[in-house]
Image: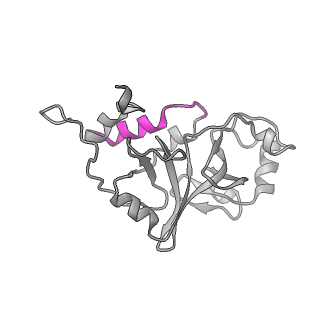
Amino acid sequence: MDDLGILNLHPENILPPAKGRLLVSAPLLQDPYFVRSVVLLCEFDEEGAFGFILNKYIDLELSDLVGDLPDFGAMVSMGGPVQSENLFYIHRLGDELPGSVPLNEELSVGGDFDVLRSRILAGEVDAQNVRFFVGYSGWSAGQLEAEMTQKAWYVTEVDVLPIMESDRVDLWGQALISMGGDFAKLANFPADPNMN
């Protein structure tokens, strides 16, 4: 809100999308998969983009999806509508998981699942170091850029702790508040503006 008390629904987004950054959905985005979502971008280039929705949790344990793994408290989320029959993961294990791809200094995506399974079974990985996703979110070439032009997304840097901790916090609101200014004021925007 400015001095006149008007809420700015389209604050200026300074950061461009990039691998390892977060997409935060604008309050008026009503796509059922992406309403009030926070997406970790795992790739962004001229061929398109992909990432995982961080705050759409599902009521399944990892052991429900992978039978020989114990439930060790790791969160499972709906990563997006693409390949929803597949399991994906981000982690803080870096080079300890062969084949993983770094997203930033702290996070990586994918890697050798057999090594990850062995480390989980040995009790060497805790729930704060890995997150699992069913499916992913994908954009074809130019699609995300078009959505950015339509003010559907805001971009911010990753704060690793909130996205890896097992508590189901209001990640969408937290991300907006951490962006400050007009973005922070949007954290309290009603889910259904017609009900306000």
Task: Determine which quarter of the picture holds residue 56.
Answer: top right
* Residue 62 shows in this picture: yes
Tell me the residue at 12%/33% (across/down): 3
Nearest the camera: 124 or 176?
Answer: 176
Position in image of residue 147 (x %, y %): 40, 59
Nearest the camera: 51 or 112?
Answer: 51
Residue extending furthest toward the left: 3
Residue 134 position (above or below residue 174) = below
Residue 149 position (above or below residue 194) = below
Using residue 70 as the reference point, say whether residue 32 is left or right of it: left
Residue 138 position (above or below residue 89) = below
Position in image of residue 158 (x %, y %): 45, 48
Using residue 191 as the reference point, say whether residue 90 is left or right of it: right
Task: Determine which quarter of the picture holds residue 150.
Answer: bottom left
Marks counted in the figure total: 0
Task: Determine which quarter of the picture holds residue 60.
Answer: top right
Position in image of residue 12 (x %, y %): 26, 52
Position in image of residue 181 (x %, y %): 25, 39
Residue extending furthest toward the top: 196
Quadrant containing the C terminus is top left
* Residue 123 shows in this picture: no
Quadrant containing the N terminus is top left
Tell me the residue at 55%/44% (across/down): 54
Using residue 74 as the reference point, say whether residue 174 is left or right of it: left
Nearest the camera: 96 or 24?
Answer: 24
Q: Is residue 168 magenta?
A: yes
Q: Is residue 62 magenta?
A: no
Region in magenta:
166-180
